[in-house]
Image (spheres, rainbow, N blue to C red):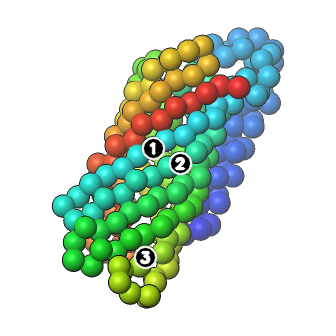
Amino acid sequence: MNKKFFYVLLIFVSLGSFCAVAGNNGVNNSAGINAKASPLSRLRIGGTLSGGVDNDYYFLTIAPRVSMEVTKWFVPGATVVYMYSQGTGGDKITSNTYGAGVFTDFYPIKYVFGRVEYQHLWYSQKAKGTTVKASTDDDFLLMGVGAKMPISAKAAVSASVLFNVLNSEKSDHFMYKNPIFSVGIDVGL
């Protein structure tokens, strides 16, 4: 994948959200969304915390995000990602990673969702005891399922299991170790 794909996907999700919000006529639509409500009332802010462990490697990711409930079953959004990772093997390689992504949650059942998330990440690696650093970037496509439970009228917690479907040993950097466990919170405005 390349950066053009990421930008096209971002534009597609943004335009789709805008068209869905702009096309409402002030009545409840078939998805049960009150179209008279301000678009801000469908905006969700939050974030996720995820991590993974392998025999000689672990990572921890913090990802603040914003999303919009276009319908009860379709919630696209964008995220910013920071990840810290460290190898526990002989080289003790540490990585600091940052980037951005877009995602879509689909709710086939009220509290159960499927997620597709694309991320483009830049990272630098350094081996312990050396001054040599390496920097590069890579694309990730995460797919999985999860559950979201309301904790108040405007807030919900979620838990999900994702898999990096682009993860391969041919990749320059296969940072995400499958499966990826994630917990998060969303708060409506």
Q: Is 113 left or right of 177, judged from the image as shown?
A: right
Residue type, numbered disc 2: Ala
**Left or right of 26, for residue 123:** left
For residue 49, the mark is: 1
Where is 111 relative to 77, above or below?
above
**Residue designated by label 2:** 63
Mark 2 vs mark 1, CA separation in Å: 7 Å
Q: Considering only vertical position in the picture, is 172 above or below 188?
A: below
Closer to the camera in the image, 66 or 49: 49
Is the residue 27 above or below the residue 38 in the image?
A: above
In the rendered structure, find residue 172 and report the number of the disc placed on it: none
Q: Residue at x 62, y 66 (%)?
A: 4
- Residue 71, visible in the rendered structure: yes
**Crowdedness of circle 3 by 10 Å Cα count: few (<14), some, many (20+)?**
some
Where in the figure is residue 7, as x and y percent of width and height?
65, 60
The residue to which callout 3 is attached is 125
Q: Which amino acid does label 1 sit on?
A: Leu
Residues under labels 3 and 1: Cα distance? 21 Å
Does residue 15 appear left or right of residue 179 in this picture? right
Residue 21 at x, y percent in the picture: 75, 29
Q: How far apart are marks 3 and 2 (CA)?
A: 20 Å
Please say if the residues under marks 2 and 1 sit with CB atoms less than 8 Å apart: yes
Q: Quadrant of the C terminus?
A: top right
| Quarter of the figure with residue 159 | top left
